[in-house]
Image: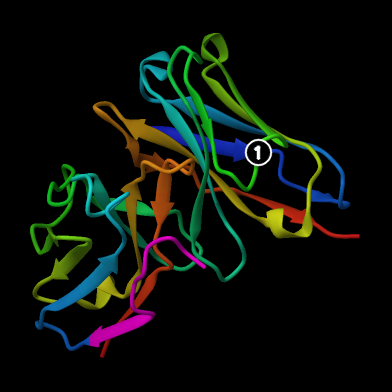
Amino acid sequence: EVQLVESGGNLVQPGGSLRLSCAASGFTFSSYSMNWVRQAPGRGLEWVSYIGGTSSTIYYADSVRGRFTISRDNAKNSLYLQMNGLRAEDTAVYYCARSSGGSWWVSDFWGQGTLVTVSS
Amino acid sequence: QSALTQPASVSGSPGQSITISCTGTSSDVGGYNFVSWFQQHPGKAPKLMIYDVSNRPSGVSNRFSGSKSGNTASLTISGLQAEDEADYYCSSYSSSNTHVVFGGGTKLTVL
Protein backbone atom coordinates (compact mmCIF):
# COMPACT_ATOMS: atom_id res chain seq x y z
CA GLU A 1 0.00 0.00 0.00
CA VAL A 2 1.34 3.41 -1.00
CA GLN A 3 1.84 5.66 2.02
CA LEU A 4 3.10 9.23 2.21
CA VAL A 5 3.51 10.82 5.63
CA GLU A 6 4.40 14.50 5.90
CA SER A 7 5.96 16.11 8.97
CA GLY A 8 7.67 19.31 10.02
CA GLY A 9 4.78 21.75 9.86
CA ASN A 10 4.73 24.36 12.60
CA LEU A 11 4.07 27.97 13.55
CA VAL A 12 6.87 30.21 12.31
CA GLN A 13 7.39 33.96 12.21
CA PRO A 14 7.49 35.91 8.94
CA GLY A 15 10.96 35.70 7.45
CA GLY A 16 11.65 32.42 9.21
CA SER A 17 12.55 29.00 7.88
CA LEU A 18 11.08 25.53 8.08
CA ARG A 19 11.93 22.14 6.61
CA LEU A 20 9.17 19.74 5.68
CA SER A 21 9.71 16.01 5.27
CA CYS A 22 7.71 13.29 3.57
CA ALA A 23 8.33 9.63 4.33
CA ALA A 24 7.33 7.28 1.52
CA SER A 25 6.57 3.58 1.65
CA GLY A 26 4.79 0.90 -0.33
CA PHE A 27 6.47 1.64 -3.66
CA THR A 28 9.94 1.99 -5.18
CA PHE A 29 10.53 5.59 -4.21
CA SER A 30 13.49 6.20 -6.50
CA SER A 31 11.42 5.28 -9.56
CA TYR A 32 8.89 8.04 -9.07
CA SER A 33 8.92 11.79 -9.38
CA MET A 34 7.38 13.71 -6.51
CA ASN A 35 5.53 16.96 -5.97
CA TRP A 36 4.65 19.36 -3.16
CA VAL A 37 1.19 20.91 -3.38
CA ARG A 38 -0.27 23.32 -0.83
CA GLN A 39 -3.71 24.47 0.21
CA ALA A 40 -4.27 27.69 2.14
CA PRO A 41 -7.06 27.52 4.76
CA GLY A 42 -10.42 27.46 3.00
CA ARG A 43 -8.77 27.88 -0.38
CA GLY A 44 -7.92 25.79 -3.43
CA LEU A 45 -4.91 23.70 -4.33
CA GLU A 46 -1.65 25.26 -5.51
CA TRP A 47 1.22 23.30 -7.01
CA VAL A 48 4.53 24.25 -5.37
CA SER A 49 7.39 22.14 -6.68
CA TYR A 50 8.44 19.00 -8.56
CA ILE A 51 11.51 16.78 -8.43
CA GLY A 52 12.42 13.91 -10.72
CA GLY A 53 13.43 10.50 -9.48
CA THR A 54 17.16 11.21 -9.73
CA SER A 55 16.83 14.87 -8.67
CA SER A 56 18.14 15.94 -12.08
CA THR A 57 14.95 17.81 -12.96
CA ILE A 58 13.40 20.31 -10.56
CA TYR A 59 10.61 22.84 -11.07
CA TYR A 60 9.12 25.54 -8.85
CA ALA A 61 6.03 27.70 -8.91
CA ASP A 62 6.78 31.38 -9.44
CA SER A 63 5.40 32.14 -5.97
CA VAL A 64 8.14 30.16 -4.20
CA ARG A 65 11.07 30.17 -6.62
CA GLY A 66 14.19 31.48 -4.92
CA ARG A 67 12.81 30.86 -1.41
CA PHE A 68 11.94 27.15 -1.38
CA THR A 69 14.21 24.20 -2.20
CA ILE A 70 12.96 20.71 -2.97
CA SER A 71 15.20 17.69 -2.46
CA ARG A 72 15.04 13.95 -1.91
CA ASP A 73 17.06 11.13 -0.37
CA ASN A 74 16.26 7.92 -2.20
CA ALA A 75 18.24 5.86 0.31
CA LYS A 76 15.89 7.09 3.02
CA ASN A 77 12.73 7.07 0.87
CA SER A 78 12.22 10.69 1.82
CA LEU A 79 11.22 13.94 0.16
CA TYR A 80 11.99 17.36 1.60
CA LEU A 81 10.97 20.99 1.19
CA GLN A 82 13.25 23.64 2.68
CA MET A 83 11.28 26.87 3.05
CA ASN A 84 13.12 30.13 3.70
CA GLY A 85 11.90 33.72 3.82
CA LEU A 86 8.43 32.58 4.81
CA ARG A 87 5.52 34.96 4.31
CA ALA A 88 1.98 35.05 5.67
CA GLU A 89 0.72 33.91 2.28
CA ASP A 90 2.72 30.69 2.62
CA THR A 91 0.34 29.60 5.39
CA ALA A 92 -1.19 26.36 4.16
CA VAL A 93 -1.43 22.62 4.48
CA TYR A 94 1.46 21.20 2.49
CA TYR A 95 0.86 17.89 0.74
CA CYS A 96 3.48 15.51 -0.55
CA ALA A 97 2.22 13.77 -3.71
CA ARG A 98 3.59 11.05 -5.94
CA SER A 99 3.72 11.65 -9.67
CA SER A 100 2.11 9.07 -11.90
CA GLY A 101 4.76 6.98 -13.61
CA GLY A 102 4.15 8.07 -17.16
CA SER A 103 2.73 11.54 -16.52
CA TRP A 104 4.70 13.61 -14.03
CA TRP A 105 2.04 16.35 -13.98
CA VAL A 106 -0.44 13.91 -12.46
CA SER A 107 -0.29 13.36 -8.70
CA ASP A 108 -1.76 9.93 -8.15
CA PHE A 109 -1.23 9.48 -4.39
CA TRP A 110 -1.23 12.16 -1.71
CA GLY A 111 -0.23 12.28 1.93
CA GLN A 112 -2.50 13.72 4.62
CA GLY A 113 -0.59 16.99 4.75
CA THR A 114 1.24 19.06 7.34
CA LEU A 115 0.16 22.54 8.43
CA VAL A 116 2.50 25.49 8.12
CA THR A 117 1.39 28.71 9.81
CA VAL A 118 3.35 31.91 9.22
CA SER A 119 2.40 34.53 11.77
CA SER A 120 3.95 36.85 14.32
CA GLN B 1 -7.04 33.99 -8.49
CA SER B 2 -6.67 30.47 -9.86
CA ALA B 3 -5.29 29.83 -13.34
CA LEU B 4 -8.21 27.57 -14.29
CA THR B 5 -11.83 28.66 -13.87
CA GLN B 6 -14.40 26.40 -12.25
CA PRO B 7 -17.92 27.15 -11.01
CA ALA B 8 -17.95 27.71 -7.27
CA SER B 9 -20.76 25.24 -6.70
CA VAL B 10 -23.00 22.72 -8.38
CA SER B 11 -25.76 20.56 -7.00
CA GLY B 12 -27.86 17.59 -7.97
CA SER B 13 -30.22 15.02 -6.56
CA PRO B 14 -29.32 11.38 -5.98
CA GLY B 15 -29.38 9.45 -9.23
CA GLN B 16 -28.99 12.52 -11.41
CA SER B 17 -25.94 13.53 -13.45
CA ILE B 18 -23.95 16.70 -13.05
CA THR B 19 -21.11 18.28 -15.02
CA ILE B 20 -18.34 20.51 -13.69
CA SER B 21 -16.48 22.70 -16.16
CA CYS B 22 -12.86 23.81 -16.06
CA THR B 23 -11.77 26.60 -18.40
CA GLY B 24 -8.19 27.46 -19.16
CA THR B 25 -6.19 28.68 -22.13
CA SER B 26 -4.25 27.30 -25.07
CA SER B 27 -1.19 27.21 -22.78
CA ASP B 28 -2.76 24.62 -20.53
CA VAL B 29 -6.15 22.92 -20.97
CA GLY B 30 -6.47 23.69 -24.67
CA GLY B 31 -2.92 22.86 -25.60
CA TYR B 32 -2.51 19.45 -24.03
CA ASN B 33 -4.55 16.39 -23.14
CA PHE B 34 -3.14 16.56 -19.63
CA VAL B 35 -6.15 17.50 -17.50
CA SER B 36 -6.72 15.79 -14.15
CA TRP B 37 -9.62 15.88 -11.71
CA PHE B 38 -9.41 15.45 -7.93
CA GLN B 39 -12.04 14.82 -5.28
CA GLN B 40 -11.50 16.19 -1.80
CA HIS B 41 -13.70 15.51 1.20
CA PRO B 42 -13.48 17.94 4.17
CA GLY B 43 -10.27 17.49 6.12
CA LYS B 44 -8.99 14.82 3.74
CA ALA B 45 -6.29 14.65 1.11
CA PRO B 46 -7.25 15.03 -2.55
CA LYS B 47 -7.95 11.83 -4.49
CA LEU B 48 -7.20 11.44 -8.19
CA MET B 49 -10.39 10.67 -10.12
CA ILE B 50 -9.48 11.35 -13.76
CA TYR B 51 -6.15 11.90 -15.50
CA ASP B 52 -5.13 12.88 -19.03
CA VAL B 53 -8.65 14.19 -19.73
CA SER B 54 -10.62 10.96 -19.63
CA ASN B 55 -8.66 8.14 -17.98
CA ARG B 56 -9.81 6.64 -14.69
CA PRO B 57 -7.29 5.26 -12.21
CA SER B 58 -7.88 1.74 -10.99
CA GLY B 59 -10.59 1.66 -8.34
CA VAL B 60 -12.43 4.82 -9.40
CA SER B 61 -16.08 4.27 -10.24
CA ASN B 62 -17.10 4.41 -13.89
CA ARG B 63 -19.75 6.92 -12.83
CA PHE B 64 -16.95 9.47 -13.17
CA SER B 65 -15.97 10.52 -16.68
CA GLY B 66 -13.96 13.33 -18.24
CA SER B 67 -13.89 15.13 -21.56
CA LYS B 68 -12.46 18.22 -23.21
CA SER B 69 -13.44 20.65 -25.93
CA GLY B 70 -11.12 23.49 -26.82
CA ASN B 71 -9.98 25.30 -23.69
CA THR B 72 -12.66 23.73 -21.47
CA ALA B 73 -12.51 20.38 -19.75
CA SER B 74 -15.46 18.74 -18.02
CA LEU B 75 -16.04 16.21 -15.29
CA THR B 76 -19.35 14.35 -15.37
CA ILE B 77 -20.65 12.34 -12.46
CA SER B 78 -23.60 10.11 -13.26
CA GLY B 79 -25.93 8.38 -10.83
CA LEU B 80 -25.12 10.86 -8.08
CA GLN B 81 -24.66 9.37 -4.62
CA ALA B 82 -24.48 11.03 -1.23
CA GLU B 83 -20.80 10.06 -0.93
CA ASP B 84 -20.01 12.14 -4.02
CA GLU B 85 -20.60 15.32 -2.03
CA ALA B 86 -17.14 16.92 -1.92
CA ASP B 87 -14.94 19.57 -3.47
CA TYR B 88 -13.65 18.88 -6.97
CA TYR B 89 -10.52 20.40 -8.49
CA CYS B 90 -9.26 20.32 -12.04
CA SER B 91 -5.59 20.54 -12.88
CA SER B 92 -3.57 20.78 -16.06
CA TYR B 93 -0.02 20.74 -17.29
CA SER B 94 0.96 24.25 -18.36
CA SER B 95 3.65 25.50 -20.71
CA SER B 96 4.05 28.56 -18.48
CA ASN B 97 6.68 28.87 -15.73
CA THR B 98 4.11 27.37 -13.38
CA HIS B 99 4.18 23.89 -14.82
CA VAL B 100 1.01 22.62 -13.14
CA VAL B 101 -2.09 24.78 -12.64
CA PHE B 102 -5.23 24.14 -10.65
CA GLY B 103 -8.78 25.40 -10.74
CA GLY B 104 -10.32 27.15 -7.77
CA GLY B 105 -12.48 24.16 -6.91
CA THR B 106 -16.18 23.34 -7.15
CA LYS B 107 -18.30 22.34 -4.18
CA LEU B 108 -20.71 19.58 -5.14
CA THR B 109 -23.84 19.32 -3.02
CA VAL B 110 -26.02 16.23 -3.26
CA LEU B 111 -29.51 17.40 -2.38
Residue span colored magenta: B1-11
Residue shown at 86%/52% (left/top)? A14
What kind of residue is marked 1? Ser
Residue A19 on image: x %, y %: 73, 33
Outermost residue on the right side: it is A120
**Residue toward you, B15 or A19:** A19
Provide the chain ID for the residue under circle 1: A
- Colour basis: rainbow
Residue A75 on image: x %, y %: 54, 9
Vertical order, B26 against A52 (above or below): below
Left-right relation of B93 to B51: right
Residue shown at 44%/21% (left/top)? A52
Q: Which residue is mark 1?
A: A7
Residue B97 on image: x %, y %: 48, 40
Residue A42 on image: x %, y %: 57, 71
Numbered-mark total: 1
Which secondary structure is most common in the magenta stretch?
Answer: loop
Q: Is residue A1 visible?
A: no
Residue B7 within the segment the image draws in magenta: yes
Left-right relation of A81 to A75: right
**Residue toward you, B59 or A17:** A17
Vertical order, A23 against B81 (above or below): above
Residue shown at 24%/44% (left/top)? B34
Which image quadrant for residue A92? bottom right
What is the quadrant of the C terminus of chain B in the image? bottom left
Q: Residues within 10 Å of mark 1 (few under 14, many from 20)?
A: some
Which image quadrant for residue A2? top left
Residue shown at 28%/83% (left/top)? B10
Query: Secondary structure under badge 1?
Result: strand
